[in-house]
Image (cartoon, helix red, strand yellow):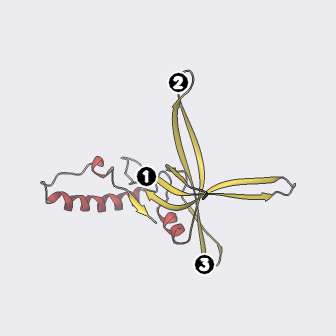
Amino acid sequence: MNQLNSIIIEGNIVKDAELKEPKDGFKVCELCVAVNRYFKNSKGEGVSEVSYFDIEAYGKSAEIAQEKCVKGRGVRVVGRLKQNRWTDANGKAISKIKIVAEHIEFKPIFNKPNTNSPMDEITQANSHSYEQELKLENSSSKSEEPLTQEDNVNQEETVF
C-alpha cells in the first residue's frame, strides 16, 4: 500500500514572508498561516480556536511566495508535512513539524477605507487589473456598471 502525506489549509498570513538563501542559489521562503475554527462546546456555547502553521516554500515558489505573501492576505496551501528532529545542548530530543508548500493559491486583496497597510499598494494594483478584466468581459453582455467588491470576491490568483 502507498503511503500518503498530504495537507490542505486555508487561512490568513500572520506576518510578511521571509526569503532566505541558506546555500548559494538555493532559496527558502518561510511564512506562518493562522487558521480559525469555530464550534460549539458541550454547553452549546460558541467557541473559536486559532491554529498557527509554519510553512516553507522552495526555489521559484519561494520567490513568488515572498513577493505575494503579505500580512493579512488569505491563502490556501496544499503541501506535505515535514518533521525536523534534533537534540538540544542539554541532550533533550526536540521535534518540529512544518508544512512544505507544493501549491499556494492567493485570495484577492481588498482595500479597506481609511487604512494604511503595507498591502495598499498591492491592493490598488490588483483592483485596477481586476476592474479592467471585468469591464472587458461585461461590456459585451451589458452596459458599463461600476464594479463592487462582490464582483471580485470569487476571483483567486493561483501560483505554482
Measure the alpha-carbon separation of dots 1 and 2. 36 Å
Closer to viewer: mark 3 or mark 1: 3
- Amino acid under disc 2: Glu
The residue that label 2 is drawn on is: 45
The residue that label 3 is drawn on is: 25
Q: Residue 103 vs residue 100: left or right? A: left
Residue at 15% x, 59% y: name it: 139
Q: Nearer the viewer, residue 5 or 16?
A: 5
Residue at 17% x, 51% y: name it: 145
Report crowding for label 3: few under 14, some 14 to 19, many 20 or more residues within 10 A (C-alpha).
few
Q: Is 65 drawn above or below residue 94 in the view shown? A: below
Callout count: 3
Q: Residue 111 vs residue 67: left or right? A: left
Closer to viewer: mark 3 or mark 2: 2
Q: Quadrant of the N terminus?
A: bottom right
- Amino acid under disc 1: Asn
Upstream in the sequence, badge 1 or badge 2? 2
Q: Residue furthest right?
A: 90
Indicate the position of residue 23 as horizontal and vertical percent values: 66, 75
Residue at 53% x, 45% y: name it: 35
Report crowding for label 1: few under 14, some 14 to 19, many 20 or more residues within 10 A (C-alpha).
few
The residue that label 1 is drawn on is: 116
